[in-house]
Image (cartoon, coloured by chain):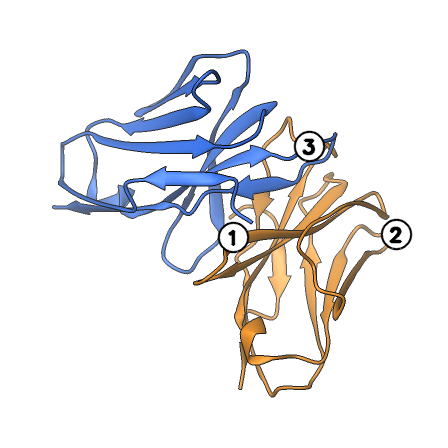
């Protein structure tokens, strides 16, 4: 079963614009991760944010986490055509395992 | 390239058959995970092994089984295949057993059951 939902399901923007994707989850977490998947290929890890962190940056990526609202957002600034992909948030399940529970994903299209 | 390898890349088989998917984790990673990605269910965690031992179990059907060998490679066995088992199967690996580190995903095996 999915941990939560991502919003929007699909997003289409022009190159150079910013893209914001949101993720909501249901249970308490230790950390939340964002992954990117190019069409039909393996997932690539983007960023991990711990439950005691509120914001994290990595290059053109900015992730926020609001544990009181059980939500996170991923911002991609100055988007490029190469950013076209599906983006998933994933939370760790209960217990000390690496089990990841993925959202449904946001499909981002960046038009050149 | 994540360093995780999966074979085969594609597999086409008939209902009722049995297949084995293979995964080699990144060098040094002790933990291996299996995920299934389908259009209707999305990305689902199946099972995790850590240093040869089963660590966590998710929505894995009884017809499916997995193991991790002493050299840390892992195999996912799918038997009595049904049309609904058609999906992308991903293997991932990480250094630690817990969720405090990122997972590195292989390219996946696309299984088509006809």
Left or right of A4 in this view: B25: right
- Separation of residues labelled 1 and 3 (CA atoms): 18 Å
Tell me which residue sits at (42%, 32%) in the image.
A24
Of residues A28 and B45, the one drawn nearer to the viewer in this rendering: A28
Q: Nearer the viewer, mark 1 or mark 2?
A: 1
The chain ID associated with circle 3 is A
Q: Nearer the viewer, mark 1 or mark 3?
A: 3
Left or right of A101 in this view: A20: left
Q: Is residue B87 above or below residue A99?
A: below
Q: Nearer the viewer, mark 2 or mark 3?
A: 3
Label 3 near label 2: C-beta < 8 Å?
A: no
Crowd rating for badge 3 (residues with CA inside 10 Å; few <14, some 14–19, many 20+):
some
Tell me which residue sits at (57%, 24%) in the image.
A31
Per the image, the residue denoted by label 1 is B43
Q: Please state the horizontal and vertical placement of residue A70, each as a whole percent of the image.
A: 46, 24
Q: Please state the horizontal and vertical placement of residue B108, each as a whole percent of the image.
A: 55, 60
The mark nearer the N terminus, 1 or 2, is: 1
Crowd rating for badge 2 (residues with CA inside 10 Å; few <14, some 14–19, many 20+):
few
The lab-note entry on whether marks 1 and 3 share a chain reads: no
Q: Secondary structure at mark 3?
A: loop
The chain coloured orange is B
Q: Is residue A30 above or below residue B98?
A: above
Per the image, the residue denoted by label 3 is A94
Per the image, the residue denoted by label 2 is B70
């Amino acid at each position: 079963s999915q941990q939560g939902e991502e919003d929007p399901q699909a997003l289409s923007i022009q190159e150079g614009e910013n893209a914001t994707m949101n993720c909501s989850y249901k249970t308490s977490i230790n950390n939340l991760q964002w992954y990117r998947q190019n069409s039909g290929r393996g997932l690539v890890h983007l960023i991990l944010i711990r439950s005691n962190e509120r914001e994290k940056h990595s290059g053109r990526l900015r992730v926020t986490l609001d544990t009181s609202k059980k939500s996170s957002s991923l911002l991609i600034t100055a988007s490029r055509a190469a950013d076209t992909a599906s983006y998933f948030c994933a939370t760790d399940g209960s217990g000390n395992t690496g089990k990841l529970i993925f959202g449904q994903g946001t499909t981002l299209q960046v038009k050149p | 390239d994540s360093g995780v390898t999966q074979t085969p890349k594609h597999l086409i088989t008939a209902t009722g058959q049995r297949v084995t998917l293979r995964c080699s984790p990144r060098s040094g990673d002790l933990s291996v995970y299996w995920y299934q990605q389908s259009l209707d269910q999305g990305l689902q965690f199946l099972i995790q092994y850590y240093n040869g031992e089963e660590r966590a179990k998710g929505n894995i059907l009884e017809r499916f089984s997995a193991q991790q060998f002493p050299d840390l490679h892992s195999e996912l066995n799918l038997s009595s295949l049904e049309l609904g088992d058609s999906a992308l199967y991903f293997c991932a690996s990480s250094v630690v057993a817990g969720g405090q580190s990122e997972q590195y995903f292989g390219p996946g095996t696309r299984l088509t059951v006809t």
